[in-house]
Image: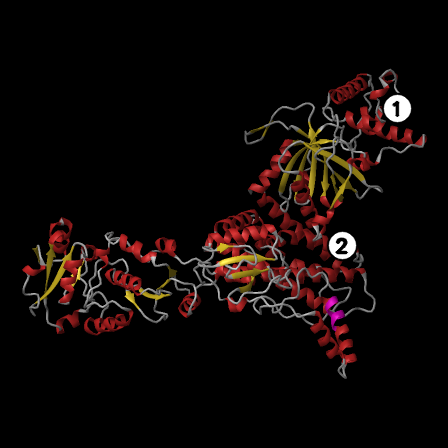
């Protein structure tokens, strides 16, 4: 932009002090700021004055301008210089001068005589809209800022401010000295001051001065509007403009994330204690004291200030988020002694003990800290604590657990709605909506409907527990709302994976949403759990209720009328979960599980479940003989609640053709065992040595075994790293057994302590050994002439083993289950065909029998 296009006229005197006076003059004379939109009756009262247009120099050579004036039926004349026109003061005509570009000499001369001056874009704009030429005592070039009201703050140079004000007037904008609710945009050169704080509180867009300059560069575009959100957002003032931030008390991962967000939001970050820092952001939960003396101009704020500024897209006021040092231990001790030395101290201490005991009973099984205030619209205040019967029966105990878990579940749903959904749906958010309505609907789905149903269930269970009797029917409560459960749960559970994906996508793409989640996750109501972790609770709730009802049925007498009601309630929950399962199979997560089922021959059908999802696939080699032969290729499929273990097939069957005509690839794996994660007692990280690389082991305790079993593996792929795999496994293990310290489930051990090594796992000798084992199995089958059915043969062998005082099978065989066949059972009996086999390749009888079943 050249200086000639930003001339300030003498008569205009475009200072902030004169702006409001001139605007009021315009309003009094024209009853309209820019355009005269007079009604027909007003036009009849006022005398009609003919408007004529004078096209100066280059303006008279533009064909589109001449055509526009003809369309709006305004006469015009062409002139090369303003001096040629001498009757501009005639009362019979209203003369409007159109100047091709606002140049110094022409514009200055016209403004000396208070002439109406327009630019070609505003004439073309009026012709396009079918409106008369606007009336303005200031030169008006275009309509880019028409009806915009601007206020300035933070500008110290008068020359720069005069240029900006003049350009705004040329584009049809209005300037106000004081900030008010009528101001549509605040042009800020600083993120401090009362005007800035008011604009933030009112949600007024705050932009840089560059916004005005760039809008002036596009002044010749007829349809351009400077208020367009897409254009304006390019020049918004970022929250951390002119801020130098440092971070104290955060983990390396959190600090790196916050530093990246600082740069993204217009700020800079520096090391702690750097003199140039303007803000020190402190993790108040870990930092108890500051390691250095504070400079006077340094703001020490909590992390909520950081995330709050990003969420509302403007720098938040520091006074609300100042970090305060906790009270010293000496002060706390003195206050404690003072309070205990009062005359009623013994009574207060006794009352405190009773209150704590009462809270302990009431908050049993509570997953989160007690809420400060429960919204009245979502749940009623809890009644008095449940009276304890003289003798607590097992049925009462299970009923109490059902009520407590239901109460906790209602609190979690209330937290999701009040802490996350309601603020996101609120109109008039600072900085505009954080998420679109479609995204909010995708994330939360039918959560409010689920909350309404379970609030009613909780109230009925609460009344039942207060007026407890063994004959009270809990099954009737569940049956009462079974249709509501069937209506509300499938829409949410079926699209839960989509909800998680939407959260992850929006968190990566929208910094304000990421900050919103960070702020809420730090609140006590969330228990430091993320929104995705809270939203999984509805997926888990119905199976949990079904288990509790089954337990309740076991402790209900046969003559109790609730016995039959409980059975019906359990069946109704099964129907709901079955309905969910049927719909869930249509989702992508279930297709992944189906792929595993088709890939693994003999995979159990109960692997398919609505609440189950595939987490990670890992290729390994077996290091022990418990699951399969040492050195065999084993694939581990980690699900969120179980572990599927399969080995590579020795012989691949033909391709599978579905009834729909689609041909699937042949099953390349053979099922070994589907292990619930709750059966894993320890995860062993085996140290790296010369003879042991990338090895780990699982200590497993099946419910049918007296002793622990050890399953060891060696990873054969680089991704994921062993450390990440073990952490992932332990995290899902901790979720399954409801433990918070997932890292404590990993134990590091030496390979010698558990007799594990990876040496010669894939050597020539190892491969030859496995080949001879296969040969021995073929020989065993070749000399097996008996056609005795498997079941009869098993009974005979078990009787034979019992006579000889031997155990029918080893512990690992009992765990793997149903792995013996007729041929494998014969392998445990002395046979002439096996006498001459080399002793170095001889194996325990149960190992040989198990290996035989691997052949197809």
Which of 316 and 584 lies nearest the eye of the viewer? Answer: 316
Q: CA distance from mark 2 to mark 1?
A: 45 Å
Determine the image quadrant of residue 29: bottom left
Which of 257 and 412 lies nearest the eye of the viewer? Answer: 257
Residue at point 64% right, 37% down? 617
Give the vertical position of 725 relative to 123 (above or below).
above
Compare marks 2 and 1 and give the one earlier in the sequence.
Answer: 2
The reply to whether the magenta stretch includes residue 356 is: yes
User: In the drawing, does residue 193 fall left or right of residue 44?
Assistant: right
Give the vertical position of 785 relative to 593 (above or below).
above
Q: Main secondary structure of the magenta part?
A: helix
Res 448 seen here: no
The reply to whether the magenta stretch includes residue 225 is: no
Give the vertical position of 332 relative to 754 (above or below).
below
Instruction: Give residue 356's position: percent from left, percent from top.
Output: 74, 70
Residue at point 55% right, 30% down? 662
Tag 1 secondary structure:
loop
Q: Which mark is residue 829?
A: 1
Q: Which residues are magenta?
A: 355-360
Q: How many circles with numbers are drawn on the protein? A: 2
Q: Which mark is residue 124?
A: none
Res 25 seen here: yes
Mark 2 lies on residue: 551
Which of 782 and 719 lies nearest the eye of the viewer? Answer: 719
Instruction: Give residue 272's position: percent from left, percent from top.
Output: 57, 57
Residue at point 70% right, 59% down? 475
Which of 850 and 210 lies nearest the eye of the viewer? Answer: 210
Instruction: Give residue 571's position: percent from left, percent from top.
Output: 68, 51
Quadrant (top left, top right, bottom left, bottom right) of the C terminus: top right
Sort mark 2 into few (<14), some (14-19) or many (20+) by Cα contacts within 10 Å.
some
């Amino acid at each position: 932009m050249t200086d000639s296009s930003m001339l300030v006229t003498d008569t205009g005197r475009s200072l902030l002090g004169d702006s409001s006076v001139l605007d009021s003059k315009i309003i009094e004379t024209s009853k309209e700021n820019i355009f005269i939109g007079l009604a027909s009756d007003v036009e009849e009262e006022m005398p009609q004055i003919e408007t004529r247009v004078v096209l100066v120099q280059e303006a008279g050579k533009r064909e589109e301008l001449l055509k526009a004036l003809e369309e709006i039926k305004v006469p015009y004349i062409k002139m090369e210089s303003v001096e040629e026109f001498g009757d501009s003061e005639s009362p019979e005509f209203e003369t409007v001068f159109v100047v091709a570009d606002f140049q110094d000499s022409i514009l200055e001369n016209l403004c000396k005589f208070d002439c109406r001056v327009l630019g070609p874009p505003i004439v073309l704009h009026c012709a396009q809209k079918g409106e008369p030429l606007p009336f303005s005592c200031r030169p008006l070039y275009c309509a880019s800022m028409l009806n915009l009201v601007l206020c300035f703050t933070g500008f110290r140079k008068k020359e720069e401010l005069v240029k900006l004000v003049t350009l705004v007037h040329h584009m049809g904008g209005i300037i106000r000295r004081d900030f008010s609710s009528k101001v549509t945009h605040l042009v800020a050169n600083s993120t401090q001051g009362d005007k800035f704080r008011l604009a933030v509180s009112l949600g007024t867009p705050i932009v840089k001065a560059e916004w005005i300059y760039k809008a002036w560069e596009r002044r010749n575009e007829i349809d351009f509007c400077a208020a367009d959100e897409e254009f304006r957002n390019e020049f918004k003032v970022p929250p951390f403009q002119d801020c130098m931030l440092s971070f104290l008390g955060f983990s390396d991962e959190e600090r790196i994330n916050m530093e990246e967000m600082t740069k993204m939001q217009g700020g800079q970050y520096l090391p702690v204690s750097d003199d140039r820092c303007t803000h020190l952001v402190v993790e108040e939960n870990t930092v108890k004291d500051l390691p250095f003396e504070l400079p006077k101009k340094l703001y020490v704020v909590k992390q909520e200030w950081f995330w709050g500024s990003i969420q509302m897209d403007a720098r938040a006021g520091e006074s609300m988020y100042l970090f305060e040092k906790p009270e010293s231990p000496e002060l706390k001790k003195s206050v404690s002694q003072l309070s205990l030395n009062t005359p009623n101290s013994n009574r207060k201490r006794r009352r405190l003990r009773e209150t704590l005991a009462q809270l302990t009973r009431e908050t049993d099984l509570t997953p989160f800290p007690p809420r400060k205030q429960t919204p009245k619209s979502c749940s009623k205040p809890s009644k008095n604590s449940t009276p304890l019967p003289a003798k607590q029966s097992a049925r009462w105990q299970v009923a109490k657990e059902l009520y407590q878990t239901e109460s906790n579940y209602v609190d979690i749903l209330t937290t999701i709605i009040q802490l996350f959904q309601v603020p996101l749906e609120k109109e008039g958010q600072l900085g505009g909506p954080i998420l679109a309505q479609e995204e909010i609907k995708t994330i939360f789905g039918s959560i409010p409907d689920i909350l309404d149903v379970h609030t009613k269930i909780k109230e009925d269970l609460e009344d039942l527990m207060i007026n407890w009797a063994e004959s009270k029917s809990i099954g009737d409560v569940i049956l009462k709302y079974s249709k509501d459960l069937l209506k509300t749960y499938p829409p949410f559970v079926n699209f839960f994976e989509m909800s998680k994906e939407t959260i992850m996508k929006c968190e990566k793409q929208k910094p304000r949403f990421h900050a919103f989640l960070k702020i809420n996750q730090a609140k006590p109501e969330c228990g430091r759990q993320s929104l995705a972790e809270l939203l999984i609770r509805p997926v888990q709730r119905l199976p949990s209720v079904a288990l509790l009802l089954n337990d309740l049925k076991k402790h209900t007498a046969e003559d109790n009328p609730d016995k039959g009601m409980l059975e019906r309630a359990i069946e109704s929950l099964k129907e709901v979960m079955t309905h969910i399962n049927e719909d869930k199979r249509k989702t992508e997560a279930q297709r992944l599980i189906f792929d595993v089922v088709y890939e693994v021959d003999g995979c159990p059908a109960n692997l398919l479940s609505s609440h189950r999802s595939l987490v990670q696939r890992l290729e390994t080699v077996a290091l022990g003989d418990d699951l399969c032969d040492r050195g065999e290729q084993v694939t581990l499929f980690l699900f969120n609640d179980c572990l599927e273990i399969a080995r590579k097939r020795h012989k691949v069957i033909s391709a599978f053709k579905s009834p729909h005509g689609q041909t699937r690839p042949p099953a390349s794996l053979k099922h070994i065992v589907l292990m619930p994660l709750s059966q894993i007692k320890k995860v062993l990280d085996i140290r790296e040595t010369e003879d042991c690389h990338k090895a780990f082991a699982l200590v497993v305790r099946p419910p049918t075994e007296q002793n622990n079993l050890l399953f060891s593996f060696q990873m054969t792929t680089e991704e994921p790293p062993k450390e990440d795999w073990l952490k992932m496994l332990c995290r899902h293990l901790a979720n399954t057994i409801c433990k918070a310290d997932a890292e404590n489930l990993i134990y590091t051990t030496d390979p010698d302590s558990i007799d594990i090594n990876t040496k010669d796992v894939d050597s020539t000798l190892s491969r030859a050994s496995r080949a001879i084992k296969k040969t021995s199995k073929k020989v065993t089958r070749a000399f097996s002439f008996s056609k005795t059915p498997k079941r009869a043969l098993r009974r005979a062998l078990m009787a034979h083993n019992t006579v000889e005082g031997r155990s029918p099978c080893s512990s690992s065989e009992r765990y793997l289950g149903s792995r013996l066949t007729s041929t494998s059972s014969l392998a445990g009996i002395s046979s002439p065909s096996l006498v001459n086999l080399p002793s170095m390749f001889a194996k325990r009888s149960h190992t040989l029998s198990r290996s035989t079943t691997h052949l197809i």
